[in-house]
Image (cartoon, rainbow, N blue to C red):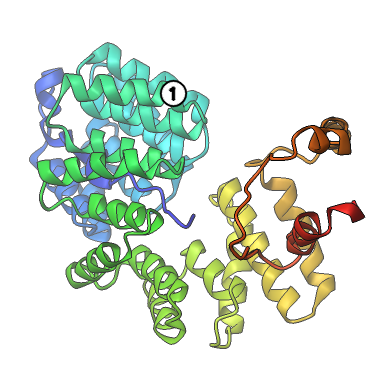
Amino acid sequence: MNYPYRLTFFNLIFLIMISSEQTNIPIDSRINRATQLIGVNKLEEAEALCKQIEQEKKDDPFLLHTLGLIDYMRQNYPQAIDKFKRSLAKVTTNVNFYTNLAEALRRNGQNQEVLAYFQEALLVDPNFPKAHLGLANTLIELKRHQQAITRFQFLIKLYPDFAPAYHYLGVMLTSLERYKEAIPLIRKSIALKEDYYEAKFSLANALEHEGKIDEAIAIYRQLLEINPRDSSVHNNYSNLLRSLGFLEEAEQHLTEALKYNPNHLSAYFNRLGKALSKEVTPDEIQNLERLLLNKNTNEEDRSSIHFTLAKYYDAKKDYEKAFPHFEQGNNIDHRKEAYDPETQAKITSILMSFFKREFFAQHPHFGSESELPVFIFGMPRSGTALVEQIIFYPSNL
């Protein structure tokens, strides 16, 4: 599933400007202005303003935290974490400081620490919705899905009108392929917040997987009208178009995705790995190789890059380059359990000991007696010929 994990930066900086109400510490109005600039992604302007303030208030905790937000937005997570921790050492009663630090740690792959800081935030304010939301999303990343569901449900009871709770619970259920449960939840989040752009993106993704293609297409088109530079929408819409056979249009949207975000890994994988007609440029390959060396690239993305490059070099018949990428991608990918030949042999032995000739002789009417034609579908090398032999030539087995 090509579904990007999205936790908005709006969640990250929300309420930072009124945090003086929690601490009784006055905040320079220029710092509030800097956070506003960060919220609209004017990072250079925000940084310049912070540098001016730094000449007067070098160790101000709110200034440190604002500089950390700038690092965060630039994906410089280690630097953001350092500044957030230094600001938290000076102000220990600001719930935003805990949640923002936790979110930076999560982005940096330090999930065990993340849980501790979200829990610290809830000690400061047990009803802070974004701490509950962040805790639930971290539990998802740790594959503790039932605990995440419980946390989302608690948050919904606490704040029945808090749209992100419904949205991210729906996102989690979508990732678990529980689309029928996910879709009503995501619709609910949009009903609560009509302009909820991200939830509409999530809804289109879930609808696509549930087979409700027309509605998914309509939503993707609507989102592109709102933001024609959204690489994730271009990427997902391209996948949908490709599945319908519109290859040229699909390729155009992949090109758009990479134009607006040269680091969009799903778009790279879809373009290089699915052999669309347009020739891949050396710059695109070099960019992927560069991302492999970037210390901020997490393990899951690193694995995807290896597989993308492996498929590219394999298609080029450059097997000496392809194989190491396949190998390294598999070594990093922990999403599936490693193949265990002994366990597989035991399972096969149990099945063979049960389904013998005697079993079928004792159950002559076992199965369907219909004479309707049987069509066998499957990917190449997936066992379709063997299934055919089992059905039509059982005496050969």
Q: Is residue 255 above or below residue 178?
A: below
State the residue position of label 1: 146
Q: Is 375 situated left or right of 188 in this image? A: right
Tell me which residue sits at (25%, 63%) in the image: 215
Picture coordinates of residue 229 (x, y %)? 29, 71
Q: Quadrant of residue 283?
A: bottom right
Q: Is 213 situated left or right of 224 in this image? A: right
Q: Is residue 193 above or below residue 139?
A: below
Number of labels in the image equals: 1
Q: Quadrant of residue 48?
A: bottom left
Q: Nearer the viewer, residue 271 or 182?
A: 182
**Visible residue check, residue 68:** no
Secondary element at image label 1: helix
Picture coordinates of residue 14 (x, y %)? 18, 38
Q: Nearer the viewer, residue 313 or 85?
A: 313
Tell me which residue sits at (50%, 30%) in the image: 111
Picture coordinates of residue 172 (x, y %)? 39, 38
Task: Name the kind of residue labelled 1 in the image.
Answer: Gln
Q: Residues within 10 Å of mark 1 (few under 14, many from 20)?
A: few
Q: Quadrant of residue 343?
A: top right
Q: Nearer the viewer, residue 2 or 288?
A: 2
Q: Is 171 situated left or right of 190 in this image? A: right
Q: Nearer the viewer, residue 367 or 331?
A: 367
Tell me which residue sits at (76%, 39%) in the image: 338
Q: Is residue 240 above or below residue 396?
A: below
